[in-house]
Image (cartoon, helix red, strand yellow):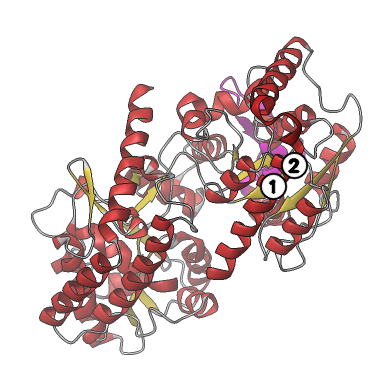
Amino acid sequence: MMKKQRYWYMLLIFLLAVGIIAGCSDSSTNESTEDDNEQAEAEETTEEDPFVLGDEPLEITMFGNYDWYTMPGWGDDQATEWIKENKGVDITAIDGGGNAEQRLTTMIAGGDLPDFIWTDRGPDVERLREGGALVPLDPYLDKYTNLRDWFGEEGINMLRSDDGKLYQFPNWYNSSPFGNAGYVVNKGIYEELGSPALETTEDLYAYLQLVKENYPDVIPFETGLDGQGINVLYSAFAEGESPANINNVAVPQGDQLTSIFTDENYVDSLKYASQLFRERLITQDALTQDQDMVIEKVTTGEIAVFASASPTDHARTGHYTLQEENPDGGYFMIWPIHEPGLDENEIYPGSYNMMGWNVSVITKGAEDPEKVFAFLDWLTGPEGQSSLIFGPEGKYWDGFDGEGFPQFTDAYHEDPEGLAKIEEDTANFQWNGNSNFLDTAKANFEATLPEDQRNWTTHWQSTITWDTQYDATQYLNINPLPESEEGIIQQRIGEIFEEARAEAIYAQSDEEVEEIMTTAEEAAQGVGYQQLLDFQTEKWQENLTILSAE
């Protein structure tokens, strides 16, 4: 963490230094001159006819600002091959070589930025913007309208920087609820045990005990990576809240964000999880297991209940695998568990935000930024999304219906393996996915099929998960820059939180859980927790003002 902070600190100094040197000849008028130039360019852009993909070849360079990211060859799969041949677009990636930060620093130092960068929104983008490396996107929004049509003004305004301009093109955004957090149940075990009620925390506890007694080789409650299922359990104790509070390490009370360590609902959820752990009703490696371990247990049916931020990812495969052994087996989802006395319709095991995941930013290294935006806007629109996710028009889809969604062919549900292969091949080209378009298209089609022919994930999304995810858009962009005073405090608070959470899970009694959280609260306040909460509250209230203005 400290290495990343130093990197960005030096990067910011470099970017600012470049700006200072460039403007030293007339520093008093440099800012106004730049604004004048941008305004003139915007007016010129508006007057020109829109650029149409395919009218001329378009070569674009991109950089994925992640150590793990390596772009496959553009044109090596059937979807991008079609885009390359029919739209004239060729994408060349600059590889990070396993150290994206260092590679980006080298490009900045050499004045050789790619046309666009795919990166996390927030501090990463703001540092590049402050250094004068990014192109504002506002001049293009009226000429190329897919982003505005599908994302909307409310979302665009939430992504604007402090200077009022838009620099970020969002990925996997949505204006409707989405997400997969919740509880998956092993159908075979559940029915063999008499299909008991699974609605309240008391029901769940009784059922897990029943599983332990009758299936000693089965894990009663699986939590997924990093104990995600423990976070999901928090939602059972709080109406109108979600694990987003855990991510923020703050809980809303009135118009203030307050300490999570003193939040009664959070403490109660840890007491419950700790009891499950002590009684071996929950996976004993909840905080240490890796992805492969989770996949193995879920796909082989060695679990009775599985809760996580997205249990459908593995349960879908597990469901079809178990059904091959027993057509009546597999997995199903249940309405979120709640503490007795709470309203089951106010329980949210997961959260979503309209901004989705990460963003693309166009740099001043782009020879023609408008054409780059035109491509990104096309890619996020109906034809771009359909071609990238479902393959070239003709096999799995054929034209669009009256609402602008793809008309799927019989092959769409008759050949799920081939369809999955296309999406898998293009996963690392999905820089500005449009969840609003894709989720609606899939759901509309699935609704026309008999239940036994519907995609397992889509079925449970449309019947349970999308209705039980919390809209956490209001909490976006409330975190400080890592090198700021509040940012350093936040890092310390995060360390205190993670340590306290782990200790609470391993606690031997409810009283010990309370003592651990009391100690954590004292430690957090000692390093400036209230200062951080005040900072986050101010940002949160600004978000609420923006959202209420729409």
Could one spot residue 242 in this view of the protein? Answer: no
Q: Residue at x 89, y 38 (%)?
A: 85
Range of magenta residues: 385-413
Q: Nearer the viewer, residue 36 or 304?
A: 36
Residue 17: which numbered mark, if any?
A: 1
How dense is the environment of label 2, judged by Cα within 10 Å: few (below 14), some, or many (20 and up)? few
Of the 4 image quadrants, the one containing the C terminus is top left
Q: Secondary structure at mark 2?
A: helix
Q: Amino acid at mark 1?
A: Ala
Q: Which mark is residue 21?
A: 2
Q: Residue at x 18, y 67 (%)?
A: 267
Residue 12 rendering spot, x and y as whole percentages: 63, 51
In contact (CB < 8 Å): disc 2 and disc 1:
yes
Figure quadrant of residue 31: top right
251 with respect to 291 (left or right): left
- Marks 2 and 1, Cα distance to the nearest angstrom? 6 Å
With 161 as the anchor, is 280 left or right in this view?
Answer: left
Task: Tell me: 264 left or right of 372.
Answer: left
